Image: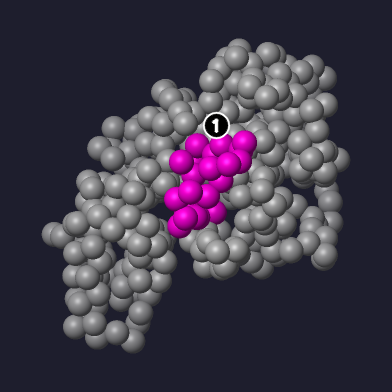
Amino acid sequence: MMILTLSFKLSLCILSALWTVSSSRAVGTLQVLGHGVERLFVNPHVNEESNCKSQLLNYLKTKAQELPNGYNDYRDMHENKYNIPELIKAFKVHVDKAKKETYGFDGRLTHEVENRFLRLKDFWASAGVDTGNILCKGLHGNYLAPGTNNLEKTLEYLNPTWNSADVDSRANEIRGFIEKIPDKYNNPLLTFKSDVYKADKAWKSDVVLIGDGAIEFEKEYCHLGDRTVEFELAFAFSKLLVQRENLPELKRTQSDAQKHRRWELMEATFAAYFLAHQYGGELEGEESCILHHTAYSWGDCNEDSGEETGHGDPDQRECAAILGMNLATRRHLKGAVLDPKMIQVQLDNYYEDILAKDPKLCHHDKNHNMEPKVMPCTQGSCSA
């Protein structure tokens, strides 16, 4: 069947800093660390009394507690003292000249990532998105290992006024930290966040960056099995779509955290739309439930308690994913691939319902057995 392309032209606000949220800001007596999924609340007892359960937060806390100095090491890893995840990203985007990419801790996911990435590009190209200049690259902690000068080159790029002694001293300090943590350069926290880079020049390529740690979380903790790569790529690609398409239209009265939450929920809707579509991931039956629960697992329970962290709480993220899946599987739309702007319009129509977790839209019960219109769900969510 020929894929129908639906385009919908809207006048949208262009944001120069699409997802900027303060990297360290006070929230009550707690300290918020990092950006997006790297954010962790230092207080290990936060949310113990809440009914909201975030598998993501539980996982990050567990991994942080395994570090020699616990949360202090986590802070140093992600904040200005070392900021190691950002160093790895800077190396891949600005310094690395390798023509061949590998994916996964041991490189065995390379072929699968390459094939599924091409499928993603073709899918969104059929909706009118220009995907020709988008690359995919892997994020590996071992890029910074001894025996390479990758770390030194990255530090030189980021700090052009430093002399060689400054660079060597900083590189030794960073490697000394990494070599004291579990699994050293393969510690999943170093590459836990897949990310994107939107080029600042038209002739440069946009980049989707797939982290080894992100894949491990979804494969081992969320039990996604052979769907892991497809899920991770779909959500990362959706982040780039939101940035490239200047989505969504924003109100001037929104706070930065509210804007960021809207972008995050839009990403979940886009990813779910691709994964559930017959020309995309073709999720059916209980696999669709895994999609819901994966979106749920990435939620931030501090949103549920009233703090604006810009991530969306688990139920909100899952509800956004349900909307995307319903759009992909409605009988009268199944043969079409919707333009991202049309999907945005649908999210706008239901956005307040998603924030309110309206059961008429989200169809959830207290046992977290999701029941969207397209099918009943009985699959369990990620491990607690």
Are there few (<14), some (14-19), or many (20+) residues within 10 Å of tag 1? Answer: many
Look at 52% across and 67% down and name the residue there. Answer: 24
Q: Secondary structure at mark 1?
A: helix
Q: Using the rendered image of the protein, determine whether residue 139 is visible from the camera's viewpoint.
A: no
Look at 45% across and 28% down and name the residue there. Answer: 383
Q: Is residue 315 above or below residue 249?
A: above
Q: Using the rendered image of the protein, determine whether residue 71 is visible from the camera's viewpoint.
A: yes
Look at 41% across and 31% down and name the residue there. Answer: 221
Judge left or right: residue 310 versus residue 11.
left
Q: Main secondary structure of the magenta part?
A: loop
Instruction: Indicate yes or no whether the magenta region holds residue 297.
Output: no
Per the rendered image, the range of residues in magenta is: 36-58
Task: Specify the quadrant that holds the N terminus.
Answer: top right
Q: Quadrant of residue 176?
A: bottom left
Q: In front here: 239 or 214?
A: 214
> What x and y, as percent, mark residue 339?
74, 39
Name the residue that disc number 1 marks.
294
Q: Is residue 334 above or below residue 238?
A: above
Q: Quadrant of residue 161?
A: bottom left
Badge 1 amino acid: Thr
> What x and y, as percent, mark residue 83?
38, 65
